[in-house]
Amino acid sequence: MTDALSILNGVSPAWFLILAGLLAWASPRSELRKALMLLGPIGALAAWFATGETGVYGVLDLGPVVLETFRLDNLSRVWALVFILISFINAVYALHERNRMTDGAALIYAGSAVGAVFAGDMLTLFFFWELTALASAPLIFSVGTPEAQRAGLRYLAIQVLSGVMLLGGAAMLASQTGSWAFDAIGTGSAAGIVLLLAFGLKAGFPLLHMWIPDAYPKATGVGSVVLSAFTTKLAIYALARGFAGEEALIVIGLVMAIFPVFYVVTSNDLRQTLAYALINQLGFMVVAVGVGGYLAINGAAANAFVGVIYMALMFMVLGAVLLRTGTVKATELGGLYKSMPITTLFAIIGALSVMGAPLFSGFVAKTLILSATHYEHHDWAYTLLVYASAGVMEISALKVVWFAFFGKDRGLRVKEAPQTMHLGMALAAFLCVFLGVNYPALYGILPYDMDYKPYKLASVYGQSQLLLGTMLVFGLALYFKLFPLKEDRTILDADWLYRRFGDASARWGAAMGQLLFDAIGKVLGAFISFVRLRLFNLFSPAGALSKEFPSGMMALWTAIMLAGVVLVAYFSPV
Amino acid sequence: MTVGQFLPAALAAHAPVLLVAIPLILSAPAAALKSGRAAWAIALAASVAAFLFAIELFLATRGDAPAISYALGNWAPPIGIEFRVDGLNAALLMLLSASAILALLFALPSVEDEIEKDKRALFYSAFLVVLAGLAGVATTGDAFNLFVFLEISSIPTYALIAMGAGHDRRALTSSFNYLVMGTIGATFFVIGVGFLYMSTGTLNMADMAVQLVELRGNRVVEIGFAFILVGLGLKAALFPLHLWLPGAYAYAPSFVTVFLAATATKVAFYAIIRFSFDVFSVGNGFVLNSFTYVITPLAIAGMIIASAQALFQSDVRRLLAYSSVAQVGYMMLGLGIGTQAGVSAGVLHLINHAMIKGALFMALGAFAISYGVRRIENFKGLGQALPVSSAAFTVGALSLIGVPFTVGFVSKFYLIQAALQKGWAFAVVAILISSVLAVFYCYRVLVNLWVAPRPDGASRPVQRVPYMILAPLLVLALMNLVFGVNAEPIVNMAETAAAAAFNAGVAP
């Protein structure tokens, strides 16, 4: 560590990113914004390196509560590092884009994710948690289509809800323990359950996951890269911090790892395919958090680290395809390797990482989790994860590469992606290979020291077998035209719960209420006109109680209520 | 009588009566003037004076200070008319006069836009009479006098609502409906007072309370209570006696809606609390049972059904009017819970709702002036055209939903706590359902405001929103946020008020 860096000792890297983002929003010139997008992460990285000692910095004493804005320890530094790295890679990748809104938003989003990771107390966490929600929404809104507007609103609602639940849970916890500290929480109390749900909303727990495949495919090309990186991984960090070793998470994680298989096979939008693959990977990490223990937490951290990079690479590839062809639909793409050969190469590297091929980063991270489940004797979890990785990760990666770049040539002859995009993808691809080959570099930054060798004959052999087997199945499915991917279908996922069912039931309830009200009005009205015809015809020729004028109705209600009160009063004890 | 807190003692000694008398007396010169602006200045001066007296009274009744009793014309109560101010109505008077000032600031540009020139002076004069009447209801300690003030406030209100006819002829039928129904309500009330007079021989409320202790189990008293509760319930727009409200709020001039939404139903709500707790007593079985079996179900029905009706409105003012009915439901639920915590939550929501609806209706007034729109579908893209007013509207809407860090959250939080203390889980469920419905109907407006793109071509040129509107609007929006974060002042106010309501009564 040089002396020059020591000024930055104890300064949270988050501020660099957020400050750069605010300046980027304020600056009208695109060149200036791009410089800020590159400098922000570099400054943050410098701050990350400068603060070598673990400890709590940036403490704000506000009387009743003490805010710890920069808690550097072995767990938080891993996540912060990858968040900073990816925001730099994204800055390079997005150099060609001129969009004031998303430039600033991406930086603030990254900064708030870093800030949330470094939060030492619940209130700071809540602040940054909500900031990630608010800063990321422009990435979807700026697409500008009505569909994206609606998806963005749904996304924002879910994210803000998660923050509100976080605050509620934290307040409940604080009222029990008297402390706002963010440490191990556990599910023993109601507060713990609320917090677990708050984290789970962002982590994409089953049934709470629908915003991921809903929003990610609708973001801008660059936007989906950033979106895929921060929110969900932040939630994994929060889970690892608060709920490590919570057995229920193993089951939840397994469900997350397995159910996307149906959607991965059938979805036509390739970015949606990736979104489901992302849920599957999050499932791996949730299982690891649930297993707990040093090896498993290391596995979760390693997976988050490399997962951010290779998923970003895949989304970058699709972003480039979207930029050049205007679509990422499997049924509209094919044969792009001829016109976009370099992008194809990066896609293959990314896919191999996603699939966990030996010598790529996915392998060294995934085997950690598999070994952890094995050592801790969660054998059924181990088995299911192996199948899930074959079914989801590999199919999704193969599918993206095959349908976009190979497969049926649809005669798309487009320009290769811009150089800056290539550079961004190259950085990510380099990291994918580098961390896969030079795995001690990855293991060295993990939270706990360990002596683990990923390249053992059995695991390399087993993983390769699995890979080849899946490729064979994929090839056969293609050959026999078994891939159910012919029409542009809408996938009805659990989101009908809130999009269809929730909305519909509210409308239905309201309509029924109205009907009931009208019906009561009609019945009473009929009764009144009956009485009026018989008795009051002489006295009220003007029809004061007729249905058109609410005063008549109202007088009746007055009488009914009077009768009600009198009856209640009559039967009341003295 | 406590010595003056900051006004000269000679004025402070007569604060209760001056608060009512100044607007009432000044309404005459206001009516005689030709110039609308001069009348406006008089109205503003009267409101500021009322506000100063309200602060004086509020400070004098804080803590354990005894209620201020003021004998009108030195005729000692119970024979003479008594004005009686304690923590409960002092808070209401503050709310009333502060709303009057904010609304009047808003009124100058809004009234010039909506009311014909030669009617403006009369308009302000009528407003002063309403203010005097409402203040009178809030201060008087005499049951019959309360009826008189209720009518004093109501009759010019009908006229004010009818003045919306320049914009929309439906204001006339709405005003007529309100007249008919309001008269029914007032009649019920005075019948109830008549029953009580018959059985106790007094009209002074404090004296009545003492006499009523002797009359336990008297059926006449119970009938009197029933008439009073229903009559005031109508004035407070308790569901299903709310039918006058949507039309009145939707078609009245913007200024009238702002002021009425913030104050009119609140004063009736206050009168219900006053009668139920201080004249009668919750210790009486029939009062508590009426709360539990009549008020509470109606409050909950109102919260849910009126919210659902709000969902289907296409006119934003009608939407907010139905939402007001639902919000009255919240206050009534607090009352129906019948504990001190419940009443405190009800009063808290009374104060907060004045801020929320004040901000919302004022923002609508701003839209109407600078853009001329009232229907939801015309709100498209308004967020870009009028960002400040739209932001204020959004704050109000979020507060209406009950998002944390707004006052709406604070009052719902206390209401839920009060319900839980009583063990009424169903009430909590109802509050949550109603809040979800509020999310839906606010969402409809906000989406059009911010997200939907502005239609091309069809849009009218947008005028700048006058500062006279922006200033009170921003004050109200900020109050929503400031008191949402630092709720202590208003919570204290509500708790003092509830304590006053509970302690002023005579233990049976």
Image (spheres, coloured by chain):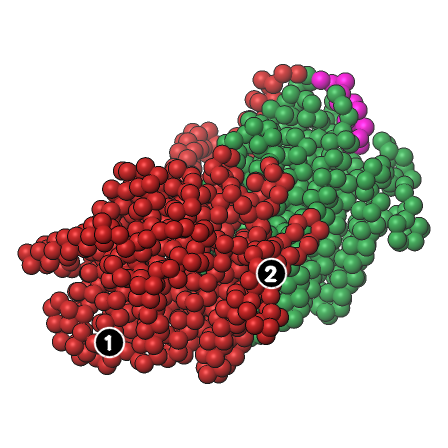
Q: Which contiguous range is marked in magenta?
A: B202-216
Which residue is situated farthest in the left direction here?
A: A480
Q: Nearer the viewer, residue A193 or A137?
A: A193
| Residue A215 drawn above or below residue A43 | above
| Residue A194 drawn above or below residue B485 | above
- Looking at the image, residue A187 sits to the left or right of residue B471; the answer is left
Chain B is which colour? green
- Looking at the image, residue A42 sits to the left or right of residue A385; the answer is right
Residue kind at label 1, given as amino acid type: Ile
- Identity of the residue drawn at 34% across and 44% down: A372
Chain identifier, red in the render: A
Q: Nearer the viewer, residue B204 or B479?
A: B479
Chain letter for mark 2: B
Residue kind at label 2, given as amino acid type: Met
- Identity of the residue drawn at 60% across and 55% down: A56
- Looking at the image, residue A161 sits to the left or right of residue A143; the answer is right
Q: Label for residue A342?
A: 1
Image quadrant containing the C terminus of chain B = top right
- Identity of the residue drawn at 22% across and 72% down: A344
Q: Disc 1 to disc 2, how far (Cα)? A: 59 Å
- Magenta: main secondary structure equals helix
- Identity of the residue drawn at 19% across and 55% down: A464
Q: Label 1: how many residues lie within 10 Å, few (<14), some (14-19) or many (20+)?
A: some
Chain letter for mark 1: A
Q: Is residue A315 visible?
A: no
